Image: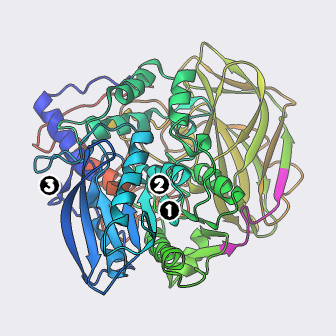
Amino acid sequence: MVDEPSRPAETRRNVLKYLGAAIGIGGIASQTEFDPFAHPVAALQSDGSFQTEERVIESFDGTELDTTFYNPDADGPHPAMLMTHGWGGDKRQLQPLAEVYASNGFVVLAYTSRGFGKTEESDGSGGQVNSTSDLERRDASALIDYLAQQDAVMTDSETNPRIGMDGVSYGGGIQLRTAANDDRLDAIVPRATWYNLAEALEINGVLKTGWLRALDLGANRAPPTGDVAPEVNQKSQAILDRGYMTEEDIEFYRSRSPINYGEIDTPALLIPEWTDQLFPMNQGVGNFRKIQDSGADTTLIAGQDGTHILGQGDNYPPGSGLSRQFVGRQALAWMNAHLKGDGNHGLSTYHYFDAEAAADAEQPADAFMAADQFPPYERKSLSYAMDETVELTGGDANVATIDREISEETEVNGLPQVTVEATPTGDGPSHLFFAVQRVREGEATTLKQQVTPYRLEAEETIELDLSGVQGRFQSGDTLRLAMSARAGPLSNADVSTVFGGNLYLNTPEGSGVEISEGTEVTLSMPASQPLPEGQDMGDGEMDDGDDGSDDGSDDGSSDMDGGENTDGSESGDGESSDDGSESSDDGGPGFGIPAALGGAGGLSYLLKQRLDGASPDGEQFETEADD
């Protein structure tokens, strides 16, 4: 557990106040620092042709929910949109997107989810936050009941409005639970959300300590933005204290996840993001498969907005502006098709952001490729027998690499899989981290900055799905599988010391992983061309980990001011390849931040401005990080 920063309590409260503003948990009062919704609908402007009214609506149990009702000026009735926010947020962060829908002929009810929205100016919604329990689902159904009784809303029967839902992260989770239980929903757009929350927070047995701390701060900072149920708080705190989830913990989070729900047959436009550290592409694919199996109309769009990223300065992933525009247009087209009957939405089964296409894109659609299935290619494999024993240690944070030179242009797209036999060393915990990289002109880039961990407790053959990636290899590039006992050497994604300095619980000094001579390592992934055979350029040799990236030493520092990245570029210079580290020209914090607690722009922007050595009051302070 991270030690409490050694600074006065009042200073700590101020730091958390500013942190809250960055990630959408501090309310609108701090917008003098920046507009946290500066660019979510850059391509979808509101024309103001609607009226708004603040309404307090009683839910099924009498709990009062804080809402804003948007009514188009044009004669109705109109189809309706129900929207709620990300973890720690409130209805005000929904305003720009709600205005877009209202300007396009939708009644919109934007609401603050149960227990959230407490600020100096507002009590927010009543009740306690229960983390997408059945209470939150029943709130959504009660609001659907309410909309069915409004003269402005189009209905299919007395209690059944023509209605869709759109929202990010926590809001997306509420959509999916509602869709599984309320068949009145006509269409949904869950963005950057989860399929299995237990797996998202502890992937393959390795705890995402950075995100657990961020989520805890998100709702419980001083003053708190939410009245979180004691069971929810105690659960997350106990997990952080012990460093792993129990079976009871896993069941708790699975019970709040689509993997545990019944059939979801509501037409769904699912939008995971390549660079998401909390809910990677795999989570979106899980939801996509579940809804696709029901026979409902389903499209998967792999975007590039960087909704959940714990620290990349004030940068967005490359092409995030183009991605937001494309996604925004398609969400509106989806709702027009399903709620207004305007005809086919025109989307393929799968659309995905392609960084190389985005480099020359003049229109948002030019940055996205389309395919009639996911993944778009058949799975291809390569294997390599280790020619020497390698020992990956937590203290050294060294790296073993297996390379293949690409002879013709190849795209990889989907969920890679790796198979390797390994043995833990030392006292543990021993974690093995994997990354798929592209080496071009001597510089290694981790595709989409995605690193996948695995907790190793005994000698075993690991068979593992890696986080979803996409990338193009030119002739002469090298495809690399990199392995380490720590995440730092494989990625240039920094995590602020406010969140412990690490995304994952790392392998400590004195422990590690051994891969024996003769062990066969297999990597397979959907690819447009067969993966090359023959001698591996890397020969399984170990790097020394000294590549200028986070070396896993957990010294409490966070490199945000120009240190070398793993791809050889300088951080903070606004230039990189498709690894998610390029600075965007979008100009400040944006859509992911207030909607979903995170985001490359807003969170890290304010961390850099406010937490890089000084408090908002100008006082110096220190933070401490552990493993």
Q: Which residue is tagged 3?
A: 29
Q: Which residue is tagged 2?
A: 175
- Near-viewer residue (465 or 234): 234
Say left or right for 209 vs 129. Answer: right
Label whose residue precedes the other's in the sequence (2 or 1): 2
Q: Quadrant of residue 466?
A: top right
Kind of residue indicated by mark 1:
Leu
Q: Which residue is tagged 1?
A: 185
Callout in the foreground (1, 3): 1
The residue at the point 48 percent across, 80 percent down is 340
- Near-viewer residue (87 or 138): 138
SS of the residue under disc 3: helix
Check if residue 379 falls in the magenta segment: yes
Q: Which residues are magenta?
A: 370-381
**Residue 359 visible to an observer of this rendering:** no
The residue at the point 27 percent across, 41 percent down is 115
SS of the residue under disc 2: helix
Labels 2 and 1 touching (C-beta < 8 A): yes
Compared to 541, does 74 lie above or below?
below
Callout in the foreground (2, 3): 2
SS of the residue under disc 1: loop
Label whose residue precedes the other's in the sequence (1 or 3): 3
